Amino acid sequence: MHTTHLPSSIFRKISSYIQDNYGIQLPPEKKTMVEGRIRKRMKDTGIQDFTDYFRFAFSKAEEKKERIQLVNAITTNKTHFFRESAHFDFLKSHLSNHGGTPSVWSAGCSTGEEVYTLAIILSELSKQRSIIDFAITGTDLSTRVLDKAANGVYPEADIAKLPLSLKQKYFLKSKDRKNKTVKLAPALRKKLRFKKLNFMDSYYGFTAPFDIIFCRNVLIYFDKTTQTKVLDKLAMNLAKGGILILGHSESMPILNPALVQLKPTIYQKNLN
Ligand SMILES: C[S@@+](CC[C@H](N)C(=O)[O-])C[C@H]1O[C@@H](n2cnc3c(N)ncnc32)[C@H](O)[C@@H]1O
């Protein structure tokens, strides 16, 4: 017999798996959301029964295939260009006399809008000679969003509110005008790299610390112990004097001893 709703036992197994491996909390009130996301995977795989789907996704053979698709489907990837724009205004003034080549990490970059917004801001700063050059790394756990981010193609409507001058400078319109998309200009894309990274990993594998880390709207999915552990690792990957920016509704459960709070959601690493 086919089950019509996600059985609670399977929901509990999947939510434990997601929390243990990716830190994302899925309390019982998220069951309907999870069910909807699993249904999409069931449609794509042609499996009609939740129990059959669970067995399939958690079989050894599917560990690197359907299991990854399931994790991709369960992550929440909401983002947009110039989201929480006060952070970009802060960055502009913070880097106004920098004179070097800041390295920036968009940690939990989702589909890339945050990375490209940073690239536009930093490119403008280099034109004004506030900085010489820049490099941005975008990371996420979801391979689906990383592919989209690396591709850099967005519906034209997504940049509707941007000033015309920025649109003209940094975006190329698709030739096919029936399918209205824009692509980020190649000169901008050259300075970016995207990489899969799970915040739960014990070692993030970067060879040099970053001057700026944006980790916005990611910690909200974790419990306080996980938040503190991830913040310790972010602080370790921040250069002395570097800046860490969290999302507008996020704060640190315990202020990391290496960091000083400059403003709500904005922190600086000690110089010593
Ligand atoms: C809501 S989006 C935030 C995007 C962007 N930073 C912003 O503020 O607009 C959160 C992202 O965090 C990623 N994420 C969640 N848990 C993660 C983990 N354990 N490791 C890496 N990325 C994770 C999700 O895949 C998702 O794309």
Image (spheres, rainbow, N blue to C red):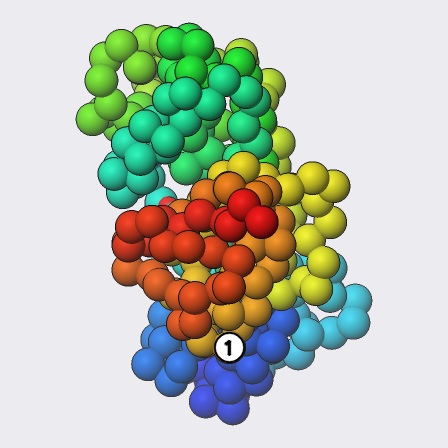
242 over 27 or under it: above or below: above
Q: Residue at x 29, y 50 (%)?
A: 263
Q: Position of residue 144 (x, y in %)?
A: 55, 47
Residue sitting at x 33%, y 81%: 29
Vertical comparison of 269 with 163: above or below: below
Q: Check the image and name the residue furthest to the front.
A: 272
Note whether 240 is above or below 199 in the view shown.
above
Snapshot quadrant of residue 83 = top left
Foreground pick, 90 / 164: 90
Q: On screen, 65 above or below 161?
A: below
Q: Amino acid at mark 1?
A: Thr
Q: Is residue 58 visible?
A: yes
Side of 155 where 196 appears, left or right: right
Left-right relation of 124 to 21: left
* Image side of residue 125 versus residue 236, left or right: left
Identify the residue under disc 1.
225
Q: Residue at x 68, y 74 (%)?
A: 58
User: Under tag 1, what secondary structure?
Assistant: helix
Q: Looking at the image, can residue 47 be seen? A: no
Residue 102 in picture, x, y percent from top left: 54, 28
> Which is more toward the observer, 100 or 226?
100
Rendering coords of residue 16 (x, y %): 56, 82
Residue at image location 34% in from the left, 61% down from the top: 250
